[in-house]
Every structure is written in structure tokens, then in C-alpha cells.
Image: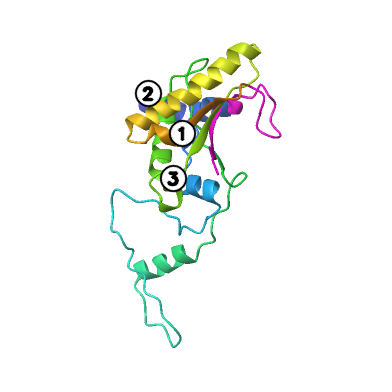
Amino acid sequence: MTIRTIAAAAAMLVPALLPAAARAAPPVSSEQIVCDLTGDCSGNAGTPTRNGPKTRGFSIIHGGTAPAQSQAGRHARTRAAAPARAPRSTVGHANLAIAFLEGSAVLTSAGRRASDEFVKALQAPALAGKRFTIGGHTSAVGGRAYNQDLSERRAAAVVDYLVTQGADRARFDVKGFGFDQPIPGMAPSAPANRRVEVIALP
């Protein structure tokens, strides 16, 4: 085998050998955040897009025989008929899956991308004028006082980042929960408990 072949094979094996916690999860989409926070998961609550047309050009046919459609038209109808997504948690509550450097309140690049999705969600008409608690959580590794402080700093770091991206600081309350609210069914020490969640305020 050539060196190039060996290097390619090694590159494919490394992700499989890494533990799940070490691989960055994809950010939660802005559409899913709106779904989780409002309970409207039909897509009607929609988030504005920065690129692309304002309409998708769907046509609705009432009765009769549908004319022949282009392949693009058939794909559009298939997308439109897809089942609506469902909230992934209690309505009004969204896990942003924001990642931090271990033991710190510094957002990773994946954490910034996840925060950007929340910034886009905030532009949705369904969330207009709403306020939110930004809650920081930690895993149960280390002492209570340390983790309480870390959870507060993580929540504050997210709000600071959101503000740099144009969000209004007055829309957010910052709260730290330490390790007292692990994800249901997960060990308190699990890395996934290191997270920031959003709760829609009434």
C-alpha cells in the first residue's frame, strides 16, 4: 500500500475510535429551537433565511387532475408533505447543545455555531418580544461551589456572545444550575450534562 492509502485509511478510522463525547455534535437547528420553544413544529413559525428566495413557488391544485410536474416540483411537494418535527423536550424548553472548553466558560467553535442558530431562531415571528432564561448546567465532576459558579459563567458567556451577534440583552435572564439538573436518564457525571438550556418566560 502507498503512504497516501495508509493515511486515508487512518483518517477514516480516527473518528470511529474517538468516544462519542469527544466528537462535536452538530448544532441544533434554528427551526428545531423554535419548535421546542413554541410547540409549533409545522414550520409555520419559520425563521427568516439570509439567503435564498422569500417564497418556494409551491402551487396548490384544488380537485381535478394534476398536470405533469417537473422533477423539482415533485421534490417540493414531497418536502411539503413530510411529517412535522416534534419538540425534543418540554415545550418552552430547548437544549442548545453549546460546547465549552473543559472546565471553562469559553465557547468552542462548535459552541459559537450553536449559539448562532439561537440568534437566527430569535428572529422568528413566533419568538418576537419573548424573554428567556439562559440556564447553565455542569456535570457532577468537582465540587458544588465550583460547578455552581461555572454554570453561571457559562450562561453569562452565552448571553455575552448573543449580544455580540445583535441580540438584545434585555431579553435574557442568566441562571446557573450547577450539577443539580442532569439530563433525565443520564449519569450526573456524563459530559452531555455540560450544557446551556433556554427556557421561554411567560
Instruction: Assess disc 3: are there few (<14), some (14-19) or many (≥20) residues with their C-alpha within 10 Å of its C-alpha.
Output: many
Secondary structure at badge 2 equals helix
Q: Position of residue 4 (x, y in %)?
A: 36, 27
Check residue 190 for magenta coloring: yes
Give the alpha-carbon distance from disc 1 to disc 2, as whole Å. Answer: 53 Å
Q: Position of residue 67 (x, y in %)?
A: 37, 82
Q: Residue at x 64, y 22 (%)?
A: 179
Residue depicted at x 62% and y 12%: 145
Can residue 166 be seen?
yes
User: What segment carries the magenta color?
Assistant: 179-202
Q: Quadrant of the C terminus?
A: top right
Q: Nearer the viewer, residue 17 or 40?
A: 40
Q: Amino acid at mark 2?
A: Ile
Disc 1 marks which residue? 172
Q: Can you identify the residue that label 3 sits on?
A: 30
Of tags 3 and 1, which is closer to the observer? 1
Looking at the picture, how far across and down is residue 87, in whole percent?
A: 58, 49
Kindly report the distance in space between the C-alpha atoms of the residues bearing marks 2 and 3: 42 Å
50 on left or right of 23:
left
Say if mark 1 contacts mark 2, CB within 8 Å: no
The reply to whether the magenta stretch includes residue 81 is no
Q: Earlier in the sequence, mark 3 or mark 1?
A: 3
199 relative to 84, above or below: above
Give the image location of residue 117, x and y in percent.
41, 40
Q: Secondary structure at mark 1?
A: strand
